[in-house]
Image: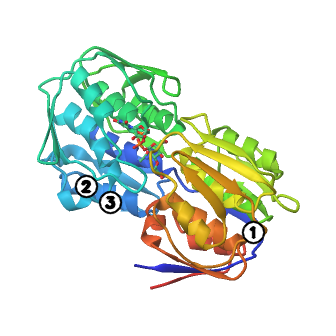
Amino acid sequence: MGILVIEGETRLKGRVTISGAKNAVLAVLPATLLAEGETIIENSPGINDVRVMGQILAALGAEVKENGSGFKINPGRVYSQSPPLELVKKLRASSLLLGPLLARYGQAEIVMPGGCNIGPRPLDQHIKGLRALGAEVKIERGFIWARAKKLKGAPVYLDVTSVGATENIMMAACLAEGKTVIENAAKEPEIVDIANLLNAMGASVKGAGTDVIRIQGVKHLRGARHTIIPDRIEAGTFMIAAAATRGEVTIENVIPEHLEPVIAKLREAGARVEVGEDSIKVTGCEGTCQPLDIKTLPYPGFPTDLQSPMTALLTTAAGTSIIKENIFENRFRHVDEFKRMGAQIKVEGRTAVVEGVDFLSGARVRATDLRAGAALIIAALMARGETIIQGTEHIDRGYENITGKFRALGAHIRRED
Ligand code: EPZ
């Protein structure tokens, strides 16, 4: 259990390069099970969740070679479709193995990944979609048990615009007989990234990135080579940190159109945002930031994963901000930690009302989930005095070398056991 020690009142300055997208690679790795042959994945971030997913594929029997920035994966010798309990428990995204295992091997047995700090995380839409494709899916003794002799394409309407369910159904449908149409599909850029890999493998996936995705099943898929897109959530985290600390930071290796809601909101807050071809320069708010109304929504709305970092910025805005969390049931656990630092926030259901205060004060706080951890780093850089953040294991799940990247921008941040 590590801690981070951070000195406050630091204006971030310089350049930071963004890593590959966690939420793309956590679906791309399971997708490699669909191919008869080796797939090469490049620009994968060196983070714990990705390491665990690689370990799960190896535990199933796949040949997994990892080098500095990627993987070579060949599922030729896969002999098991029941990933080990202790690894699945560590990784919520293990549910994304269901579709590929079912489509390739006709079966899958996965322990129900636990809920986490942001809500129960049900899988009913994943199950609805796989059943529509003809799979028999049962939940027994805390396991999801799925069987299908041969999947058959079918129309699937998602009651909830679920990223994971869209990905699972899309991957399963690639090897189903006939045509699948997913309606009310999620439109996140990570879904487009996975669809690009599937098509490179020989699949026929059309419409990814819109709310209707059409998949024509094929008999076989072959290995391919794929470069993961940059992580828009990591990029947004550093953009918000630059504005919140009134610094001047150029974020490199980004796809600007993936960050439109963040660019718009930071400009509304009074930061200067200059958009380049594959970089974004953020110059912090002159004086204090303006208060904002934030509503988290499925892409292309404001991303729920940046709600807590943006809340950190708004704790010292010049007025009252209203934040509505429309995606997850319980994603305000960072609020209590901000209040220990002097923030004035009231939570009613899915709405947080943030009264801007003059300054935050350093304190001992705890990261409750990955994005809340990043948000606490931002608050600590803004605050007067020293902050100690416990629970760094959450942060390391999803941010590659986060202390090194912040230190390179001038932050006084160090790890201690
Ligand atoms: C993905 O989670 C991301 N994780 C999350 O990032 C992200 O916050 C989320 O999408 C929303 O953008 C990965 O891609 C690995 P959902 P996912 O299914 O797929 C409800 C991070 O910090 N729902 O789109 O699990 C669900 O309860 C993580 O990087 C159902 O009701 O999210 C939630 O309220 C956190 N039934 C809403 O939909 C289902 O079957 C959105 O969930 C599935 C989901």
Disc 1 packing (10 Å; few <14; some 14–19; many ≥20): many
Whether residue 399 is situated above or below residue 113 in the rendered picture: below
User: Residue 258: x percent and y percent?
Assistant: 63, 40
Q: Quickly name the residue at label 3.
A: 52
The one of 97 and 194 positioned closer to us in this rendering: 97
Along the line of sight, the residue nearer the viewer: 301 or 69: 301
Q: Does 88 appear above or below 409?
A: above
On screen, residue 362 versus residue 46, left or right, reads right
Looking at the image, tell me whether mark 1 or mark 2 is earlier in sequence order. Answer: 1
What element does badge 3 sit on?
A: helix
Q: How far apart are marks 3 and 2 (CA)?
A: 8 Å
* Quarter of the view holding residue 179: top left
What kind of residue is marked 2? Val
Q: Is mark 1 on a helix, strand or loop?
A: loop
Q: Distance between the residues labelled 3 and 1?
A: 32 Å
- Find residue 243 and report its image quarter: bottom right
Picture residue at 56% right of the left edge, 53% below the top: 347
Question: Which residue position holds label 1?
Answer: 12
Alpha carbon of mark 1 to alpha carbon of mark 2: how far? 37 Å
185 horizontally vs 11: left or right: left
Q: Residue at x 27, y 47 (%)?
A: 74
Q: Mark 2 points at which residue?
A: 88
- Of all residues, the one furthest to the bottom in this rendering is 417
Res 252 visible: no
Considering only order in the chain, which callout, 2 or 3, is on the residue closer to the N terminus? 3
What SS does tag 2 mark?
Answer: helix
